[in-house]
Amino acid sequence: MPKIVDYEAKKRMIMEKAVDSFLQKGFHNTHLVDITSACGIGRTTIYQYFRNKDEILQYTIAHLFESLRDDFRIILADEAESPLQTIRKLIPAILKEYDNNRKLVVLVDLWLIMIREEHPSIELVHDHMAQIRHTFQELLDQGIEKGEIRDMPTPSMAFTLYVLVESFLIHLALHQGEDVQKHIGSVQLLLDSLQAP
């Protein structure tokens, strides 16, 4: 009887092994043979799933962002929360996610590698990050409309909130082991300034 292979599970396994190699060797120094060897598959087999390592990287980015968006949808789906309360939960959740979950660690590490190596897929990361900024802007607009958040230029504030998160993530990637929890109180103080008088 022929062996049945779960196509998506195999792609995820290849992705995980590739990510390990990207993090250890860098993207440019990782070769398909490194990935196939780590997976225990032949070169012809990997081509059934990915054409090249760029495609693996793009799949990884899309997969990681989709997984993070699923986590954020849970927070955003709580209709009992006001827009400001949602922002207050969302930013710490992103920071705690980094501390608790390998997905975000890998994403930030890959992002830094792509910046350093000037990889063209960095645009894909920027597109996904623009969606996070857009989410902040929508929440700010809703909060202003409800009178909960002070009137302000929301594109600029959404950018500022996004840069705050981005800076934290880069800092945490460079200083692993940093206690995220001790900084969340300071973030909440900053968010207090958004509240309408």
Image: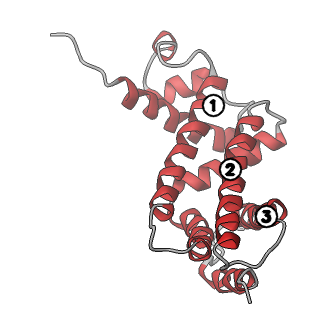
| Residue 31 seen in render | no
Q: Mark 3: which amino acid?
A: Thr
Disc 3 designates what residue?
154
- Element type at mark 3: helix
Residues marked 3 and 2 touching at CB (< 8 Å): no
Which residue does the image show at 52% across and 33% down from the upper left?
15
Disc 2 designates what residue?
109
Q: Position of residue 66 (x, y in %)?
A: 53, 44
Mark identifier at residue 96: none
Give the answer, above or below, for where 74 lies relative to 122: below
Q: CA distance from mark 1 to mark 3?
A: 31 Å
- Element type at mark 1: helix
Q: Mark 2: which amino acid?
A: Asp
- Mark sitting earlier along the chain (3/2): 2
| Residue 136 seen in render | yes
Q: CA distance from mark 3 to mark 2?
A: 29 Å
Location of the N terminus by quadrant is top left
Number of other residues with Cα within 10 Å of mark 1, as a class: few under 14, some 14 to 19, many 20 or more: some
Which residue does the image show at 68% across and 70% down from the upper left?
145
Give the answer, above or below, for where 115 lies relative to 92: above
